[in-house]
């Protein structure tokens, strides 16, 4: 009789990987926070217009690689020298006010379904850890993968430590699969963008959610299901509110794309 070792005996786990912008959240997180950021005097009107234009292209048709690189560079420059602790505090303080109206009810229900069926839920986003980790906490995600910017002496240097974009996302979920024992062939992934094709290719069950033109074409060719999410809801009506230690979950993370734009909301509230 063959004696199985512990690795052979342990069943492989499954996971569901979700992109964030336009998959769970109804619009780009960068676009959502550009105006309050500018209202607080933290970015110039010129920078705001550049951000809105970049996101306009993204929302309409899906940003290509060059556009995403330009947005990454622009936002990286904006946060250079910012105080890390202040950004984390602002994120925790304004989370419900900004995110609540933007969360798709269909995505929340799908996350709950995967949990009910015993799968881990992982949010994989090019936005910064300071945004993605608190949102993941509210959604009950088991893990998040997000862009990390380097810091020194409590401030952001402007250098990207890890960019959770395109092949970077695929590499990250392969690493998670190796460490957590996920069977990617039995796992799921959801995204709206052709730039996430490497991540979608890694799993056995890929879904296009509100897809851009190119991803819709690929989904049609490969027989992937296409989901349409249209119902934004307040997250607080779906899940329990977080405890007072929400800011602590971002400790060890650093800001990156999208995350910096949360900062203006607090200044706007004080000004009002």
Image: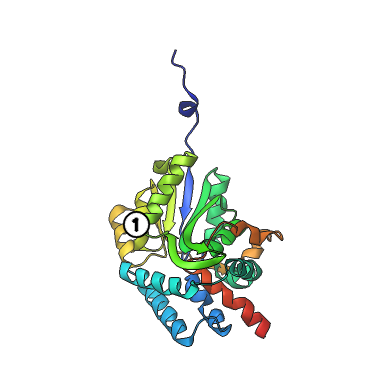
Q: Position of residue 3 (x, y in %)?
A: 46, 17
Left or right: 3, with 67 as reference point: right
Left or right: 270, with 14 as reference point: right
Q: Is residue 270 above or below residue 21?
A: below
Circle 1 Cα neighbour tier, 10 Å, few/some/many (<14 / 14–19 / ≥20): many
Outermost residue on the top side: it is: 1
Q: Is residue 164 above or below residue 8?
A: below
Q: Camera-side residue: 227 or 234?
A: 234
Residue 170 visible: yes
Q: Secondary structure at mark 1?
A: helix
> In which quadrant is the N terminus drawn?
top left
- Residue at the (40%, 46%) spot, across then down: 174
Residue 26 visible: no
Q: Is residue 260 above or below residue 189?
A: below
> In which quadrant is the C terminus drawn?
bottom right
Q: Position of residue 74 (x, y in %)?
A: 41, 74
Left or right: 218, with 97 as reference point: left
- Residue at the (57%, 84%) spot, across then down: 39
Q: Camera-side residue: 254 or 183?
A: 254
Q: Quadrant of residue 216?
A: bottom left
Q: Position of residue 9 (x, y in %)?
A: 49, 26
The residue to which callout 1 is attached is 197
- Residue at the (64%, 66%) spot, across then down: 92
Q: Position of residue 12 (x, y in %)?
A: 47, 35
- Residue at the (52%, 71%) spot, across then down: 260
């Amino acid at each position: 009789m063959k004696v199985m070792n512990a690795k052979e005996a342990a069943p492989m786990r499954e996971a569901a990987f979700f992109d964030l912008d336009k998959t769970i959240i109804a619009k780009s997180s960068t676009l959502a926070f550009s105006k309050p950021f500018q209202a607080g005097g933290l970015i110039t009107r010129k920078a705001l217009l550049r951000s809105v234009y970049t996101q306009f292209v993204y929302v309409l048709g899906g940003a290509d690689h060059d556009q995403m690189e330009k947005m990454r560079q622009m936002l990286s420059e904006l946060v250079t020298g910012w105080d890390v602790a202040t950004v984390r505090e602002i994120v925790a303080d304004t989370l419900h006010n900004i995110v609540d109206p933007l969360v798709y009810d269909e995505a929340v229900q799908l996350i709950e379904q995967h949990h009910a069926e015993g799968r881990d839920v992982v949010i994989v986003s090019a936005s910064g850890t300071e945004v993605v980790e608190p949102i993941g906490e509210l959604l009950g995600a088991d893990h998040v993968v997000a862009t990390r910017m380097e810091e020194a002496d409590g401030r952001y240097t402007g250098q990207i430590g890890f960019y959770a974009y395109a092949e970077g996302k695929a590499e990250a979920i392969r690493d998670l699969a190796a460490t957590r024992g996920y069977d990617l062939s039995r796992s799921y992934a959801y995204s709206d963008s052709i730039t996430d094709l490497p991540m979608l290719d890694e799993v056995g069950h890929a879904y296009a959610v509100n897809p851009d033109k190119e991803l819709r074409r690929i989904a049609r060719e490969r027989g992937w299901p296409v989901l349409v999410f249209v119902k934004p809801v307040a997250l607080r009506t779906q899940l329990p509110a977080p405890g007072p230690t929400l800011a602590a979950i971002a400790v060890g993370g650093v800001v990156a794309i999208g995350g910096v734009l949360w900062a203006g909301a607090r200044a706007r509230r004080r000004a009002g």
